[in-house]
Image (cartoon, grey):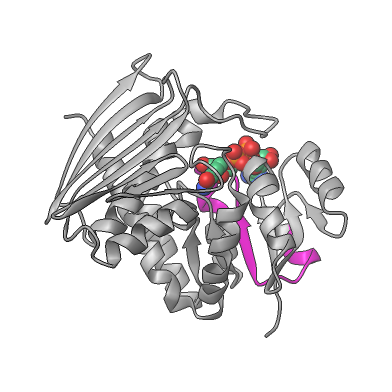
Amino acid sequence: MRMLKGAIVGFGEVARNGHWPAYAASREAEIVAVVDRTAERRKVAQESLPSVATFSTLEELAAGAEIDFVDICTPPALHGEPMLDALARGWHVLCEKPFLLDLSELEKVRSLARERGCAVVPVHNWKYAPIVRRATEILRAGAIGELRGVEIETLRVEDCAAADPDRPNWRRDPAIAGGGVLMDHGWHAIYLARQWFGAEPSEIHASLHRATPAGAEDEATLTLVFPSGQAKIFVTWRADVRRNTMRLFGERGEIAIDDDTLRVGDESIRFESALSAGSHHADWFASMLPDVIASFREPTLSLQAFEEAALCLSVIRRAYQPA
Ligand SMILES: NC(=O)c1ccc[n+]([C@@H]2O[C@H](COP(=O)([O-])OP(=O)(O)OC[C@H]3O[C@@H](n4cnc5c(N)ncnc54)[C@H](O)[C@@H]3O)[C@@H](O)[C@H]2O)c1
C-alpha cells in the first residue's frame, strides 16, 4: 500500500520526542515536512530530520509539499485553526490532546471533516500504554465481572516543561492551555473511564484548586457517574511524588495498576516502564499509529475516537462551570 505523507505542525517536545521517532520506524507513514512558527524550532527540526522541508505557515506548506495528513502538536489553543485549515485543503488530521477547547469549534470540525471525507483523530495515547492495554484486555475477558468503579490518580510535582520559545509556561496560562491540570492530565483519565465503562457519564461532580482565582487549576477531583458505577479522578501538579495509579473494581475482583505493576487476583505482572516515566511516550504513539493510519485510509474508523474527544471536552467544560 502507498506510504502516506504527513507534516508535523508545531515541532516542540511531544513532536520531537513522542511522535517523530514512531514515524521514523513506520513503513506506512512518513513525515516529509514540519511547520513551526519559530525559526528556533524549525532549526531543531532540520537538525533532527535533515530530509524534511520546513515551513512557517500552512499556506507555505501547501505551496511547497504534497501531503495526505497533518499531525498537530501546537499548544492547545492553537489546535483549532490549523485543523480547520487542513480539512479545508482535504488533508486528514491527527491532533494532540486536549483536542479542541471550544464546543462550537468542535462542531465546525465535525461538519467540515464530514463534508471533505477526511479523518480527524485525537491522540488518545494512554489507551495504548502496554499496562493499560493489558488491564483493558483482562477487564474485557470478564476476569473481575461487571465493572462497578474506577479510580485514576495522576500525581505530578509540577507541570511538564514546554519548548515553545515564545510561551515556555503555556501550561499555566488558561488562555493558551484552555485550563490547568484537568485539561492537561484529566483528559486522558476521562477517555479511559469512558472506554472501561463503555458508556457516557450521566452526572459530573468536580472540585478544583487554584493558587490564584484567575490562574489555572493545579489540582482537580472529578467524579463521573456512569450507569453501572462511578469513576473518581484525581490529578495534581502539586504532589510530593510523581506517580500514576489506576484501580478497576468489578463485581468479582479488582485490577490494580501501580505505575509499572499490574495486579489481578494473585497475579502480579511487572512492565518495562512505569506509567509516570517520561512525558512523551514514543512507544505508545508507535502502537497507536497503525490505528491512525487505518482511519486515514478509511475515515469512518475515526468517528469513535472523535466522539471520545467530544466527551472529554464536554465533561471538562462542565467541570469548569461555577457550582
Ligand atoms: N499525549 C501526550 O501524552 C502528550 C504529552 C505531551 C504533550 N502533549 C500535547 O502536545 C501539545 C504540544 O505540547 P508540547 O509539550 O510539545 O509543547 P511545546 O511548547 O514543547 O511545543 C509546541 C510547539 O508548537 C510551536 N507553535 C506554537 N504556535 C504555533 C503555530 N501557530 N503554528 C506552528 N507552530 C506553532 C512552538 O513553536 C513549539 O515548537 C499540547 O497540546 C500538549 O497537551 C500530549
In the image: residue 30, left or right of residue 255: right
Q: Position of residue 91 (x, y in %)?
A: 60, 70
5 to 80, vertically: above or below: below
In the image: residue 223, left or right of residue 116: left
List the single residue furthest toward the top.
212
Q: In which quarter of the image is residue 26?
A: bottom right
Q: Tell me which residue sits at (48%, 35%) in the image.
A: 177
153 to 291, vertically: above or below: above
Query: Is 77 colored magenta in this rendering?
Result: yes
- Quadrant showing the N terminus: bottom right
Q: Where is residue 103 in the image (x, y as percent from the top left)?
A: 34, 51
Q: Indicate the quadrant of ligand 1 in the picture.
A: top right
Q: In the depicted view, which residue is nearer to us: 17 or 83?
A: 17
Q: Position of residue 104 (x, y in %)?
A: 35, 53
Q: Where is residue 99 in the image (x, y as percent from the top left)?
A: 46, 51
Q: What stretch is highlighted in magenta?
A: 60-82
